[in-house]
Every structure is written in structure tokens, then in C-alpha cells.
Amino acid sequence: MSSNTPALLEGATRTLAEFASGVAFDDLPKQVVARMKTSLLDSIGCCLFGATLPWTQRVQAMVEEEGARPVASIFGSGRRTSIAGAVLVNATAGHAFELDDIHKESIVHAGSIAVPVVLAFAEQKGGVPGRALLAAMATGYEIGTRVGNAATMGLFFRGFHPQGTSGVFVAAAAAAHMLGLDAAQMQHALGIVGSQAGGLMAAQEGAMVKRFHSGRAAQSGVYSALLAQRGFTGIGDVLEAGYGGYLSTYSDKPNAPRLTDELGAVWEAGKVGYKPHACVTSIHSSLDAFRQLLDTHQLTPGDIERVDVGTSRMTYQHCAWTYKAQGVTAAQMNLFYGIAVMAYDGVAFVAQYAEERLAEPRLLDFVERVHAHVDDEIEAMGPAYRHAARVKVTTRDGRSFSHEILNRRGSPENPMTPADVEYKFRNVVASCLSPAHIERVIALVDRLEHLDSTGELIALLAAPR
């Protein structure tokens, strides 16, 4: 029994539950409100584009065939289903193309989980004030990212996908907040959802199921909150239990104090970053450093003999495996393919990961020129620099050039501006929304805390494409 093994941090689950149940909009610092609005816009774009992709559509077809009480919309379809069914589809869509926001320390993409959850509950209620939506969204981000922080990279190195594991706590906290659960019920919601955490990192090498991890995390959070509302009980010390708890089971190097460090004073929700490239965050610094060398020295793919990329051990493990053209997911998670498309296209966005590009002979040829290694100096800098990269290009005429990026573009340390994220949103949803509706969504999100109802925003996202 867990009671025979010392807790990693006595009372941590209860402390987080008490905090989460009490969060009000007025508690949120202005910068957190601003970050949540930016994340909302970014996540809406990810969900709408992701809804057009075949893996999401397979999940949608399954949910529609099952049938359910129609209270929440499947984005872009004009159809409704249950809250649990809607978030399964919409959160799969949000994580469907490696565009969703990222909290670096926790390795959680909270937006693709929290946004579908809070919008589904808001729709069931007939639209809620924007302030309520933002408070619930921030609560989900805060709890889920703190859990991920405490799990450390040890969870990843054990082979678990943080999105499907730590991500369930994003969903449970956001859902419980939307339901107005008290501290005891919130604690049970967290205690229930911890038993539903799951997702294996081997999915990154081509499987559609990687996208589904996000949908299942969202659905599990919804079920957990609804069950807690009905008096169903969970593991009261789910996070800190010394035996069989979330941290002690999923991570070989948990850091339990990160669960509650400066809780309420320092907001992890304010540390979210965004993606300028449609691929795994871990390779963004490598791509940008390589692009910098191409531009600075006016290099073409034909000029290049060899590319050497130095990364952290995590990035190397995560992304530097032998590339095979085995699907979009694999290409988006692979360092070598990313460098190759950057060499020829100068960008790594939606078009570069189209199915017909994945086995393009010139890209496969360039992939063979790219070599990766663990950079000991980057590794020594610690987890905060796990996205850092050093890139060296050697040309066929014997020249060599190097460039280093320690903080990736889009991170809190090297941020994309709200205008940058808006530009990304416009490009991502250009095929999903009319120009007028794009402008209206942007305007509504910008004024969200002043809206009495989120009904119009939800209707725009729900409308059939």
C-alpha cells in the first residue's frame, strides 16, 4: 500500500486541488490573461486545421457513429455530440499537426487539451462569460504544467508521452473548474484522472495514435470531473503517493517540490511558448540555426557537403533516429527530414509535411548529408537548454560555418509576439475560415475578457466547412 511508503511531498494533491478550485479571473496576472488569449487563438487555429486531417476524421467518424446527446460541437462539422465525444475529436485535432503551443519544462501542449475542454462545457451551458473561460483555461494550464514539471524528463526517458500522461491533469482541472467543483471534488477529479494517464513515445515514428493521446487526455479529464461531481472517488494523494502514485510510477527522477513551488505567485501558465514551424519543438533551434547559415552565406543545397547538428541528449533521443518515409508524424518528429526541407524550401510549415513530399528523392538525398550528436556542453547546461542547438555546415569547396541558438524562437526567452501568433493563425486557418470569419474570431478573442457570452465564438468554430 502507498501508506507504507513515504509520500514524495505530503499533501501536494490536496494543495493543488484547493488552489485550482479557488482560481478566479481576478486572481490572474495581466500577463497570464494576455498569454491565455494568445494561446486560445493559437489553439483554435490548430484545432480547425487539424479537423481537416485524415487521422482526426477517423476519430470523428467513430464518435458520430456511436451517437450521443448533442450538447457540444465537433469543430468545423456543424454537428454536435456529448462533451466527452467532442473533446476526443477536437483535442485530437488540436495536436494533429505539431503546431500546438508548448510549455518547455513540463513538455505539455496544454492548449490542444484545455481549449476543447473549456469550449465544450461553455457550449453546453449556452455560452459563458469570457472571464470564466479564461479562468478555467488558466487553471488547467497551471495544474497540468506543474505536474509535468514535477515528472521531469524522467517521464519522457521512460518512454511516456507527456501529452497523454501529464496532459490528463490539464483536462481534469479545466473541466472541474468549468463545473464549479469544490476543493474536495477537484481533488477527486485529479485522483481519478491520474489512473487514466497514458501514451507511449514510440508513437512518434509514424503512428496516428500520437495525435489521439491528446484527445484521450481531454476525454479522460472530462470523465474524471463529471464522475467527481457525482461523488465518485479517486486517489487522494495521486501525485505524491510513494508507491503507485503518478510521479513515483511514471518518472524515475521526480522532483515533487515543483508541484507547488511558489504556487499562486509564479504562474507556469504564463511561461507557454508557440511554434513557428509545423514540427516537434525540439528541432526548432536546429532549423533556425541552419536557416541562418543558409541566408548569411548564400548557400544552396548543392553547395553543402555535410551538416552536423549538436543537441541535448533529450533532443537526440527524441528526434535523431534514422529517417524513413513512413508517414507525416514521423517526418514531423525527425531532425534529418526537417533540415532537408529547410535546405530546399527555407521553411518547415504545413506544405513541407504534405504526404507527397515525404519520400521526395532530393530530400532523401539531403537527409544522408545530415549528422547529429549529443553536444556535451549543451547537455551540461541542463534541462532549460534541452532545445538548444549548434549547427555546422561544411561546403563542397571546403568551407565551414557554424551557428548556435540556445533559446528557440517562440520560447518565453525568445518569444513570438502576439502579432506573430496572429500571423500564424491567419495562415493556418486560411483554408478553414472565410476572411470575414478569420477577422471576427481574432476580434472576439482579443476582447474575450469583456464578452458576456462566448456563444458567437463557439458558433464560428462549430460551423461546417
Image (cartoon, helix red, strand yellow):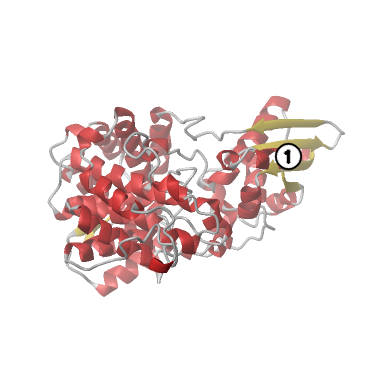
The residue that appears at 38% across and 30% down in the rendered structure is: 418
**Which residue appears farthest toward the bottom when viewing the image?**
66
Relative image position of residue 38 (x, y in whole percent) = 35, 35
Q: Alpha-carbon neighbours of circle 1 within 10 Å: few (<14), some, or many (≥20)?
A: some
Please report the residue visible at 21 percent of the width from the left and 58 percent of the height from the top. Answer: 185
The residue positioned 60% from the left and 54% from the top of the image is 318
Residue placed under numbered mark 1 in the picture = 301
Q: Nearer the viewer, residue 208 or 375?
A: 375
24 vs 96, nearest the viewer = 24
> What's the residue type where badge 1 is placed?
Pro
Image quarter (top left, top right, bottom left or bottom right) of the N terminus: bottom left
Answer yes or no: is residue 78 visible.
Answer: no
Q: Position of residue 277 (x, y in %)?
A: 52, 41
Residue 6 in sight: yes
Please tell me in which quadrant of the rendered image residue 420 appears: top left
Q: Residue furthest right?
A: 398
Image height of 184 relative to 38, above or below: below
Q: Quadrant of residue 244?
A: bottom left
Left or right: 83 with respect to 34? left
Position of residue 174 measured from the top left corner of the image (x, y, whole percent): 27, 51
Instruction: Please tell me whether mark 1 sits on a helix, a strand or a loop.
Output: helix
Q: Residue at x 21, y 33 (%)?
A: 26
Q: Residue 325, percent across and down?
A: 63, 60
Of residues 441 and 222, the one nearer the viewer is: 222
Count numbered badges in the picture.
Answer: 1
- Left or right of 149? Residue 368 is right
